[in-house]
Image (cartoon, helix red, strand yellow):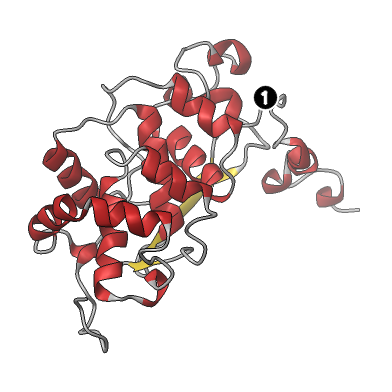
């Protein structure tokens, strides 16, 4: 009988309890690391846990929360926004640094860690970068059944396309963007650019929708930003000339 029959492969270790990782009470759930801006997670996870995971502003926590809240915005997402009000920390889970930082400079605005979650979540939900692929790694290397998370490069060298905008009035993430427009300004600007270009995924955003009305009210500000952003932000540029008119 081979040793393989006696010993569990290292890659399989912990797999049997992965089904319970999503429980908020399970210490392996990243929510137990990421919800509260405090070093208190050390009491839950011990000193062996990665020192980079002791607070909410690290790249693993911010990436995990953005991916989690992209598909389902719930009370944990709202709680993270409400609890993490520090503006000191950079947005280390940002995708498309050029667009994000230019928008922050344009508005003279510094997001809180919680506001960055809203921006990162909506960006992942509504904008796709065909040439941008994430890498996957365990959330906590020191925990056997820690879930895998997607880590994206901050800088984008790709064009972008809109997605998931078929029902703008019923999408909770759209309402979050309109509730926090300054935090999500670069995402709103990219959607507005799609409306101007008449991109297929923006076809449902009409003046009869809440988002269409919102963009119309912010048109002057958005136009001013796009005049600066179009030559500087690669993701705002077209991969090829459109077959449709680029302007309304």
Q: In front here: 66 or 217? A: 217
> Residue 107 occupies which quadrant of the picture?
top left
Count of marks overlaid on the render? 1
**63 lies above or below 29:** below
Which residue occupies 24% across, 84% down?
A: 242
The answer to whether residue 3 shows anywhere in this view is: yes
Tell which residue pokes out farthest to the front in this image. Answer: 208
Which residue occupies 82% across, 48% down?
A: 3
Q: Could you say where residue 205 lies in the image, as x and y percent from the top left?
A: 39, 65
- What residue sits right under mark 1 in the picture? 27
From the viewer's perspective, tell me whether residue 120 is left or right of residue 87.
right
**57 lies above or below 247:** above
Q: Give SS at disc 1.
A: loop
Q: Could you say where residue 209 lies in the image, as x and y percent from the top left?
A: 42, 60
The answer to whether residue 134 shows anywhere in this view is: no
Q: In front here: 107 or 117? A: 107
From the viewer's perspective, tell me whether residue 23 is left or right of residue 125.
right
Tell which residue pokes out farthest to the right in this image. Answer: 1
> Residue 183 occupies which quadrant of the picture?
top left
Q: In front here: 97 or 134? A: 97
From the viewer's perspective, tell me whether residue 179 is left or right of residue 101.
right
Q: Could you say where residue 192 lies in the image, as x and y percent from the top left?
A: 27, 61
Which residue occupies 33% across, 75% down?
A: 199
């Amino acid at each position: 009988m081979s040793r393989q029959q006696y010993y569990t492969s290292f890659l399989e270790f912990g797999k049997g309890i992965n089904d319970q990782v999503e429980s908020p009470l399970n210490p392996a759930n990243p929510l137990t690391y990421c919800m509260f801006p405090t070093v208190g997670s050390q009491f839950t996870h011990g000193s062996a846990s990665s020192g980079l995971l002791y607070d909410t502003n690290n790249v693993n926590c911010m990436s995990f929360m953005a991916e989690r809240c992209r598909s389902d915005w719930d009370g944990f997402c709202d709680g993270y926004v409400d609890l993490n009000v520090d503006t000191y920390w950079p947005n280390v889970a940002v995708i498309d640094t050029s667009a994000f930082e230019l928008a922050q400079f344009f508005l003279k605005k510094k997001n809180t860690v919680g506001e960055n979650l809203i921006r990162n979540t909506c960006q992942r939900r509504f904008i796709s970068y065909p040439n941008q692929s994430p890498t996957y790694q365990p959330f906590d290397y020191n925990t056997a059944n820690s879930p895998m998370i997607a880590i994206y490069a901050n800088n984008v060298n790709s064009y972008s396309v809109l997605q998931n905008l078929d029902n703008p009035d019923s999408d909770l993430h759209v309402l979050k963007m309109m509730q926090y427009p300054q935090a999500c300004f670069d995402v709103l600007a990219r959607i507005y650019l799609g409306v101007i270009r008449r991109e297929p995924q923006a076809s449902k955003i009409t003046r009869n929708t809440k988002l269409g009305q919102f963009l119309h009210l912010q048109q002057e500000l958005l136009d001013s930003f796009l005049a600066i952003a179009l030559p500087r932000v690669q993701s705002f540029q077209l991969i090829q000339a459109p077959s449709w008119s680029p302007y309304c």
